[in-house]
Amino acid sequence: MSFRVLGTGSYAPPKVVTNDDLSQFLDTSDDWIRQRVGVKERHFSVNETAADMAAKAASTAIENSGVNPEEIDLILLATISGESQVPSTACMVQGLLGLNCMALEVNAACSAFDFALETVAGYFARGKVRKALVIGAERMSRILDFTDRGTAVIFGDGAGALVLEAGENYIDSVFYVQGDDEVIGCGLPVGNSPYYERGQEKKPLAYMDGQATFKFAVNAIVNDCNELVRRNGLTYDDIAYIVPHQANMRIIDFASRKLKVPMEKFSVNIDRFGNTSSASIPMMLDELNRAGKLKRGDLLLLPAFGGGLASACCLLKW
Ligand code: COA
């Protein structure tokens, strides 16, 4: 027993920031960002927290599912950009939604939505929950270094959510972790312990080695998708859509060519939202669902990758 999807929702804050807007204070250009990253615009929060965005996406998913909110037994939230360590952002979402259920958080950076799906599958397998909310929500603007053109132009804010119930539609998954804080990272503020050696604090803002990330990401999509297709006796003709983490258009394009799977099979909205980290896959799923592009029984691959370093891929039947 695993789960099936009953409904989807998403939310992006109203403020749209174009590449030209960023060029006002960064040495960059609309042309460069479109060509190297594939982003035309992104949404940035002005005052909404990751929890606020998560709650809005979750409410629309609940509405879309037709489920009575009281039936939800678990909220599992993927995020790296909440306002506090305590309470967790997941607890804040539970409070905002006024639900009486357990809430916990998964941190696997941009791959975290897949890690959350795997975690929730365990709860369903044990018969512990009837309905669950799985959410990816990021206020990336909170942890971006807006003086670093290598990262600030890539990311955006938003949230996506799925309502799940017990079922058999989570078919298979792969996960990979290669602990490393050189390629991608984001520190936390250090306390004022008088016993600490100073000078080893990491900047509490996101940093990234773009080229190393690029290579890791392309290999991750290719290896993880191929592994799931192979071991489930499928071909890419059996897959309705590949819904990748929306990291960078060129990464998706490279992966498409390496896999010899046409770009039409990849769902992409990075041009309008940028890289929303753990929110990108559920936001894309909601867009496909609301556009009526997903049919019951469709097979989807959900490759994700990023900080950790970590990568994952889920094979899901719609
Ligand atoms: N605007 C304009 N020019 C920029 C720029 C920007 N935002 N960022 C870098 N450049 C310049 C560099 O200074 C360099 O100039 P030079 O040739 O005169 O020295 C040139 O562009 C190429 O820089 P480089 O760092 O080699 O760029 P790149 O082709 O590797 O592209 C990334 C940079 C970040 C777009 C690319 O590495 C990438 O997409 N990496 C993956 C990022 C990602 O997806 N992260 C999320 C993972 S979850």
Image: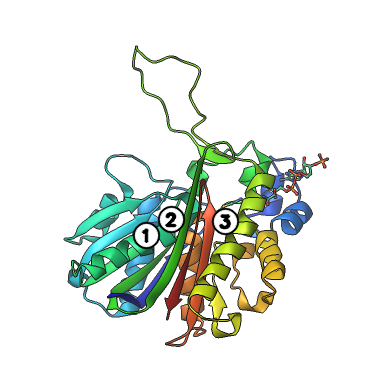
Crowding at dot 2, Cα within 10 Å, few <14 / some 14-19 / many 20+, comes out as: many
Q: Are marks 2 and 3 in contact (CB under 8 Å)?
A: no
Label 1, label 3: how many angstroms apart (C-alpha)?
18 Å
Residue 185 in sight:
yes
Residue linked to disc 1: 116
Colour scheme shown: rainbow
Examine the rendered structure and indicate whether residue 12 appears above or below residue 44: below
Which residue is rendered at x = 62% and y = 52% of the image? 216
Q: Are marks 1 and 2 in contact (CB under 8 Å)?
A: yes
Q: Quadrant of the N terminus?
A: bottom left
Q: Secondary structure at mark 1?
A: helix
Amino acid found under the numbered disc labelled 1: Ala
Residue linked to disc 2: 112
Q: Which mark is residue 210?
A: none
Q: Which mark is residue 275?
A: 3
Amino acid found under the numbered disc labelled 2: Ala
Q: Give the image quarter of residue 8.
A: bottom left
Which residue is rendered at x = 21% and y = 75% of the image? 68
Q: Secondary structure at mark 2?
A: helix
Amino acid found under the numbered disc labelled 3: Asn
